[in-house]
Amino acid sequence: MNGYTKKMWMQTLYIILGVCFVIFLWWILSFSLHTTLIPNPWETFKHLFQMLGTSELWKAIGGTLLRLLISFVISFLLALILGIVAGLCKPIYQFLRPLVLILRTLPTAAVIFILIVLTKPLFALFIITFLLIFPILYEAVSSGIQNIDVNIMNSLKLDGGVYNPKSLFKIILPISSPYIFLGIVQALGLGMKVSIMAEVLCGDNFIPGLGRLIYYANQTSDMKTIFAVSIVAILLIGSVDIILSIAKKKIKK
């Protein structure tokens, strides 16, 4: 076993031990409080496996992921364009800064209620997710470009200009990729949480999603379902994080 493989196995072991520790703390909490508000892990996982055999859960997962994907693609494309321009042009960055700051500090719940009143619930779910993840992606792209070594940028200006497509896609964006990948992970994590929260607050019968399952479980005080759906959301985001980490390492190679 070489050093790299051993390191990967050790990292995996530490992650597994960390997960076991969290589950142990969860069990201690549920055991000590003696309340149905916090079901024990074993009952929750049993209930989760039962839910995995139903089409309702898979439709909910598909609905939430589809809306998140559409919102993310739109946000990423706009953030990439504006982030590149702002990263290369300081006046544009300063001009957009107030707007981005406002978007980052929006009170999420209040905005969701306003959008539900002003638009259809389905549109509200897309818009609120966009408003929350766009600033993260924009800052990731613009910050990544602004942190490129000055000597590299000066060389690009001499060779053919920083706005040259070849310079952008072969030098500037690859160098900025650590910032961009971090922004993507943060945006997807926040996007998933916001999307589910918006689905809960919306409570629409005709919009499948994990938040809808939580909403109806809350109506009947079904805490096992709430915990089970939360675990599904965590696993989805964790899977995306792992995929992006692998892709990041492949790109570096």
Image (tube, rainbow, N blue to C red):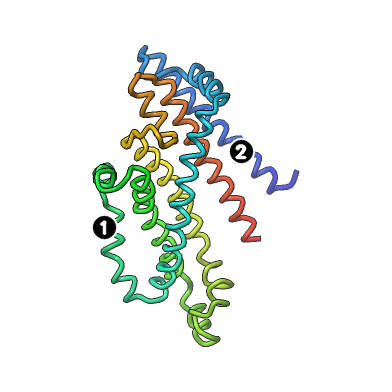
Asked whether 84 or 11 is in front, the reply is 84
Relative to 67, 253 lies left or right = right
Question: Distance of mark 1 from mark 2, alpha carbons?
Answer: 39 Å
Earlier residue among tags 1 and 2? 2
Q: Position of residue 125 (x, y in %)?
A: 37, 45
Residue 107 against residue 30 in the figure, above or below: below
**Point 56% across, 31% down: residue:** 17
**Residue at the limit of the structure toward the bottom, as seen here:** 158
Circle 1 or circle 2, nearest the eye:
1
**Point 57% across, 77% down: residue:** 166
Asked whether 216 or 22 is in front, the reply is 216
For mark 2, give the secondary structure. Answer: helix
**Could you tell me the amino acid type at mark 2?**
Thr
Residue 231 against residue 76 in the figure, above or below: above
Query: Circle 2 is placed at which residue position?
Result: 12
Q: Position of residue 104 (x, y in %)?
A: 31, 54
Q: Are marks 1 and 2 in contact (CB under 8 Å)?
A: no
**Could you tell me the amino acid type at mark 1?**
Ile
Query: Circle 1 is placed at which residue position?
Result: 102
Give the class, few, some or many, for how many residues have Cα within 10 Å of label 2's Cα (few <14, many ≥20). few
**Point 52% across, 62% down: residue:** 177
Q: Which mark is residue 131?
A: none
Asked whether 184 or 51 is in front, the reply is 51
